[in-house]
Amino acid sequence: MKINFLIPFISKSGGIIAVLEYFQHLKNKGHDPVLYYPLIPHWSIVSEKASVLLKIAIVAKRFLLKRRINWYFEPIPVTPVFNFSNRFIRDADISVATAWPTAYDNYRLNPSKGIKFYFVQGHETWINDTKTVENSYRLPLKIITISPWLTKIMEEKYSRKVEIEIHNGIRTDKFRPSLIRKEETITISTQYHELECKGSKEALLALDRIKKEFPQTRIIIFGLFAAPERTFDFEYYRNPSMAQIISIYQQSHIYLFTSRAEGWGMTPLEAMACKCAVAATSVGSISVIGNDKNIMRIEINNVESVVEGLRELICNRTKREYIAENGYQTSLNMSWEKQSDRLEKVFLEAVREPNAAKDIFNNYK
């Protein structure tokens, strides 16, 4: 099959990583996937309020980028195009939108570009233009989701049939435990994000209290943004490489995940694969893989709950190691290969359906 993936950008994110994995696995199976990204950005998700000069700089940077993604484990070829239009997107069997702006692009493409899918990896209503985002889920595209709560939203809020729910996997050949983690000093790591829904505010407030209560605790924070305000001592890694991220997990005894809402959220599973004890809210991937044996449950938007969970993991080594071991065993069962097989099957079935593209358009309300 010829499969077109329409990605809005090529910077590091969980959503892009998922697409890269499916691209690689489908290619390894003998299919012909292409990753397209636009040289003219979707300003609604890049920098809508940017000055004219900044927008020129962003576009210029995209034109200068090489035709591959080099920040992942293996270099991934990408095809930059001026925009996602019929002129620049090849004819194919399948075309997949991977974010809400690309859903509109995919909808406007000719039927010759293939059966149209929408890979929904989040309910992206945190964007200012909520109505436009919500209407993207009503477009006549075949829906794929990555978690039960997204499936429920698509079915109940938007009355959409979900073709398949596929769960993100983990590269256990890359994310694996360290043999030399030091036990003298407890290390806690977490990811920082500026979006309120990611819960970094609660994480920072809780870690501030933990640092005061356990001064010897080492805290490592990483993220794509500038470091948050330093009200306590911590190490910060901005835009770390994949190797650095793995190293952070391998040094950490505890990984803290305080998100309020996630499509999936890859970091808890990555931390589990490196045998960290994960303290997490029950959102995204945790609602699928989490239980009382493999995570320390903490409440959403509740700093006191976060502090209590971290305190117990710091003070109770037996429980910390029990959760870490069970989390590690959970990660071993989350392969990209299995999910890629399921995705491939859905694509093949769609292509084999007579008048597949016409049928979904006629059912559009």
Image (cartoon, rainbow, N blue to C red):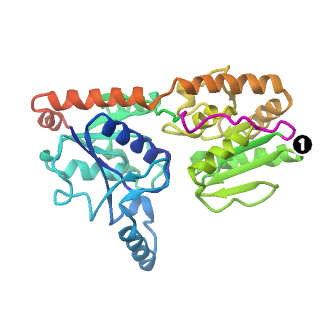
Q: Residue at x 54, y 39 (%)?
A: 266
The outermost residue toward the bottom is: 53
Residue 107 lies, in percent from the top left, at 22, 48
Pinpoint residue 31: horizontal percent, then vertical percent. 25, 38
Q: Is residue 234 left or right of residue 213?
A: left
Residue 214 covered by magenta stretch? no
51 or 132: nearer the viewer: 51
Quarter of the picture containing the C terminus is top left
Q: Which residue is mark 1?
A: 213
Residue at the image position 71 percent from the left and 44 percent from the top: 189
**Residue located 34% across and 53% down the image:** 101
Q: Is 100 in front, or is 217?
A: 217
Identify the image quadrant of residue 121.
top left
Disc 1 marks a residue whose amino acid type is Glu
- x, y percent for residue 88: 20, 59
Question: Could you say where residue 2 lies in the image, as x and y percent from the top left?
Answer: 21, 42
Q: Nearer the viewer, residue 44 or 332?
A: 332
Residue at 69% from the left image edge and 36% from the top image edge: 178
The answer to whether 74 is drawn above or below residue 280 in the figure is below
Query: 10 Å neighbourhood of mark 1: few (<14), some, or many (≥20)?
Result: few
Chief SS of the magenta region: loop
- Would you say 177 lies left or right of 8 here? right
Magenta residues span 172-185
Decide: is 250 above or below 195. above
Under circle 1, the secondary element is: helix
Q: Nearer the viewer, residue 177 or 88?
A: 177
Q: How many marks?
A: 1
